[in-house]
Amino acid sequence: MTKNLFFLLFKTTNKKLHSQEAERSQKLAEIGAKLRAFREKESICLDKVAVVTMIRRDLLHAIEEGQLDQLPEPVYTQALIKRYAEAMGLDGAEFADIFPIAQSTPRSVPKLSWQDLPQLRPMHLYLFYTFLIIFSVNSLSQLMGGSLTGKNQIGTEQIVLQQQEIARLAAESDRTTKNQKVDTYTALETARAGGSPNKAGNKPVMVSVTFKEESWLQIEIDGKMEFEGILPSGTQRTWQAKEKLVVVAGNAGGVLIAFNNGQAEQFGDPGVVKEVVFKADELKPSEKPKTEG
């Protein structure tokens, strides 16, 4: 009877753990569906979200599809959900609170009275204590082994993720530095020729961009991709076109735009991806219809 009681308690604990895992999976599916529906409604591709949030695309896809087994520990998953929602202009804290990370308080187990148990003899007590010691040692060994294995796997995954992020940021920084060197060389060559890089000349479309905050930027000039990358705060760039110039910013609130030497204005709301078309035959720019990338 005592043996059956211990197995019943162990079985109840495992059932609660599975119930908590099922609840997280259900909540993640609901959150992912809402985020994907909002992103598709705004016609924002998942690659642009990955650039703005600096979260790998496969992790964003796992959130949208509710694939809990493809994500890290619940506390890290909650942080990823918050950053994703904020990048879309939503309340990140509200979405993060929906995803449960703390274990629910276990229900109290009814106490058993010694009067309800059959009278035990010394031999029964000896067998009971022997079984209890063996069961405790085996359970402790399995729990410690599983915990160490899980922590080692999670630690390895985190190290790999950090290394990938560092490599990606280093590549972006190197590309930004090269672009700045090209701009400096172009300005020197223009000055030697007696001109000025800020004058439009024969090109009727000129856009000057000033970065208050770091932002991802994409420039298309007369149908040709001219620039794509992340530029730091304080950067000032100018592009010219004959007919049409398309500007896409990942953080519209951190970018100031001046059209044909006009007054610089904020490009859009903070943390929002915005795309605007500047044309030679228009006095004011127009927002280009967004298409899924």
Image (tube, rainbow, N blue to C red):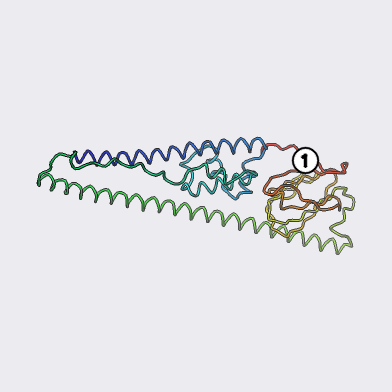
Q: Residue at 69% x, 60% y: name it.
A: 177
Q: Is residue 105 above or below residue 235?
A: above
Q: Dividing the picture into quarters, in which one does residue 293 lie? A: top right
Q: 187 or 212: nearer the eye?
A: 212
Q: Report x, y in % for residue 156.
A: 45, 54
Q: Which residue is mark 1?
A: 287
Q: Is residue 97 above or below residue 164?
A: above
Q: Report x, y in % for residue 151.
A: 40, 53
Count of numbered badges drawn on the protein = 1
Q: 28 or 179: nearer the eye?
A: 28
Q: Tell me the amino acid under the disc marked 1.
A: Glu
Residue 167 horizontal side relative to residue 270, left or right: left
Q: Report x, y in % for residue 194.
A: 89, 62
Q: Residue at 13% x, 47% y: name it.
A: 125
Residue 28 horizontal side relative to residue 105, left or right: right
Q: Residue at 47% x, 51% y: name it.
A: 157
Residue 264 horizontal side relative to residue 174, left or right: right
What crowding class fits label 1: few (fewer than 14 Cα within 10 Å), some (14-19), or many (20 or more)?
A: few
